[in-house]
Image (cartoon, helix red, strand yellow):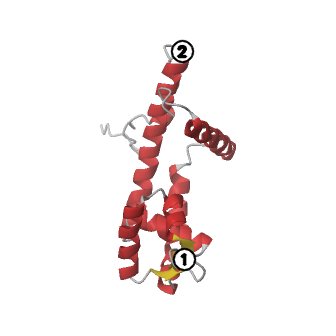
Amino acid sequence: MDSTVTGTFHPPRAPSYLDIEMPATAPVTDRELALKLWVVLARAHRVIADRARRDAERRGLTLSEFAVLEVLFHKGDLPIGQLGHRVLLTSGSMTYVVDKLARRGLLARRRCGEDQRVTYVAITPAGRHLMAGIFPQHAEAIRRAAAGLTAEEKRAAIALLKRLGLAAEHATVDGAE
């Protein structure tokens, strides 16, 4: 007699940190909760950033290059310092990324007419064409990475993380700031 089982086999899935509830022995002090929050934020950031990085690399860009092109694609020309601030890159890293993208013909520098010390970065038609073709798929990759939360949970997370970031920016560290 044939003893094979029909149907689809689903191998066990490794638990995701999204599946894990806070155990009864969860942190109880504010310090323990802050440390747990830091670990959870770091892990979530790593996972989503890795997805974004892999998606950008599949399209022939580093995540920094993609970020620069994305900001210029959506916001228009910006002074290089403001652009670096928006994509969280230092001035040295910005110079490197802008040089690479300019060599590829995806963006160009131009001096400010009123203040020659200011350099603007502008996306070229080739850069705009590239981003128009790849941004929708990248946005979908990020949507899939964030699919573990409902729309309402995403709104709440955005508000809470903004509040956390602003408070952390003004917090003192060992009374040093």
Residue 95: x and y in percent read: 39, 69
**Within 10 Å of the Cα at label 1, are there few (<14), some (14-19), or many (20+) other Cα atoms?**
few
Image-based side of 57 in relation to 177, left or right: left
| Residue 28's disc number | 2
Residue placed at 50% from the left, 83% from the top? 124
Q: CA distance from mark 2 to mark 1?
A: 48 Å
On the rendered image, what quadrant is the N terminus found in?
top left
Q: Amino acid at mark 2?
A: Val
Q: Which residue ends up furthest to the bottom in the rendered image?
A: 125
Disc 2 to disc 1: CB gap under 8 Å: no
Mark 1 or mark 2, which is nearer the start of the sequence? 2
Instruction: State whether residue 147 is above or below residue 1.
Output: below
Q: Quadrant of residue 53?
A: bottom left
Residue placed at 44% from the left, 39% from the top? 42
Residue 4 visible (yes or no) = yes
Q: Nearer the viewer, residue 114 or 88?
A: 114
Residue 90: x and y in percent read: 42, 58
Q: Quadrant of residue 89?
A: bottom left
Residue 112: x and y in percent read: 56, 80
Instruction: State whether residue 92 is above or below residue 46.
Output: below
Q: Amino acid at mark 1?
A: Ala
Callout 1: helix, strand or loop?
A: helix
| Residue 132's disc number | 1
| Residue 44's disc number | none
Q: Nearer the viewer, residue 55 or 163?
A: 163
Image-based side of 108 in relation to 54, left or right: right
Residue 4: x and y in percent read: 33, 40
Q: Nearer the viewer, residue 163 or 147?
A: 163
